[in-house]
Amino acid sequence: MTQSLATALVAGVLFPMHERLKGHDTVARLRALERSQWLSPGDIEARQAEALRAFLVTVARDVPYYGKLFSEYTFDPLQLRSTADLTALPLLDKARIRANRDAMIARTARGLKRYNTGGSSGEPLVFYVGRDRVSHDVAAKWRATRWWGVDIGDREIVVWGSPIELGAQDRARAFRDRLFRTTLLPAFEMSDANLDRFVDAIRAARPRMLFGYPSAIAHIARHARARGRRMDDLGIGVVFVTSERLYDDQKAVIESVFGCRTANGYGGRDAGFIAHECPRGGMHVSAEDIVVEIVDSEGRPVASGDSGEIVVTHLATGEFPFVRYRTGDIGAFDPAPCACGRGLPLLMEISGRSTDFVVARDGTIMHGLALIYTVRDLPGIEQFRIVQHDLERTEVQLVASPAFTRAHEQRIVRDFRARLGADVDVRITRLERIAPEASGKFRYVVSHVRAPVVSAETQIA
């Protein structure tokens, strides 16, 4: 990987110094991750089991909640032989964390930072993160960045919207971003005037990479195309997208407008950076520090290739442990190896949160895409959101031009009833603007009907 002098200075000197000052061992972790990714799947699995055993022994000793839990379940972490032994423990969900938050803090914890999720699923969560977890997450993201021939210190545009990040834009943060050649664009401020400004900022920066929500970056791309602004002549090497499902139409417009490939990342503020896409298309799990299970509604593992809920044990969370944490996301293990040669396990068919699924009156579960395709392909649609309030009532919120007619409304109602049930009340609500969530993310489908966990036995349309 050929680097500019500025990139080499940031990646080799300034950023490592920054991490050391914060008490993070990010650089050492990166070097270890770049070696271990080439081990065989069997060697990675053996190392993972050994690390898991050590992690659980420490957790049992230092964390009151887990000491008590292991005793109740007569679980001896010293006897753990493989990651499959985790099934002896219950799943961890947001309600359990909220009820036991103080008891989940390790007695040895120092310097924890308070974090929270945005509550897009209706269940916001407050939790704590230590330096070990931060070091892992930064190193895992750094490793994936380098897969694509870019590095920390290359010019970067970040399209983000979390109030945590934006609230921290004090002088020190702004100076750090300039030093590391990063520019932040606020994802929740998507007026036409701001979009013009964003396009200008990207053209002026000529970044090597973009990073952010796929919905926000796709929105900028569509705006640039509508304005006749060319964006594929800037030397952008890759667009990293994360935190939302990447839809095919978003991927197509991003790659067409910016003239480069997209690299999907999967994870969350609570569960950590779980998996990253390599240039050969494999969605690689950061297995050195994260154990992923795919389980059915009873918490039992499903066969490789079958869909289920993604459950995570993060081995760098000893100060506030996440053991068998339910992400609420649906996915499957890919049984085929990646052509890149890395031995890391692979995820496929990450379908988004269980709240991205809708449920028909007869109990049939379907991904929101079954409804999205109908709305998205109609003329005049500028923005939309589908809200399933309950089994009897679904609302379609629209921002549309005059090209969208009464006949198109009738088609939506007809198609939705064909999928959800003939007597379902389908309402069309016209709006001037559909705002993203407070985090800056945008969800095309919001279902308030709790769908069961998708598994091989679950009926899916």
Image: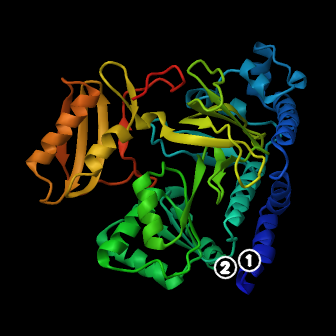
- Observer able to see residue 187: no
SS at mark 1? helix
* Location of residue 104 with respect to 243 vertically, above or below: above
Neighbor class of circle 2 (other Cα within 10 Å; few <14, some 14-19, many 20+) is some
Report if the CB atoms under discs 2 and 1 are less than 8 Å apart: yes
Viewed as shown, does residue 246 lie left or right of 333?
A: left
Q: Position of residue 108 (x, y in %)?
A: 83, 40
- Residue at the image position 72 percent from the left and 53 percent from the top: 134
Q: Split into 4 quadrants, where in the image is the N terminus?
A: bottom right
- Going 21% across and 26% down the picture, which residue do you hit? 424
187 above or below 57?
A: below
**Residue 46, position as x, y percentages in the image:** 87, 36
Residue for badge 1:
10
Front-lying residue, 329 or 73: 329
Q: Quadrant of the C terminus?
A: top left
User: x, y percentage for residue 136?
Assistant: 75, 52
User: Residue 408 appears at what percent x and percent y?
Assistant: 15, 47
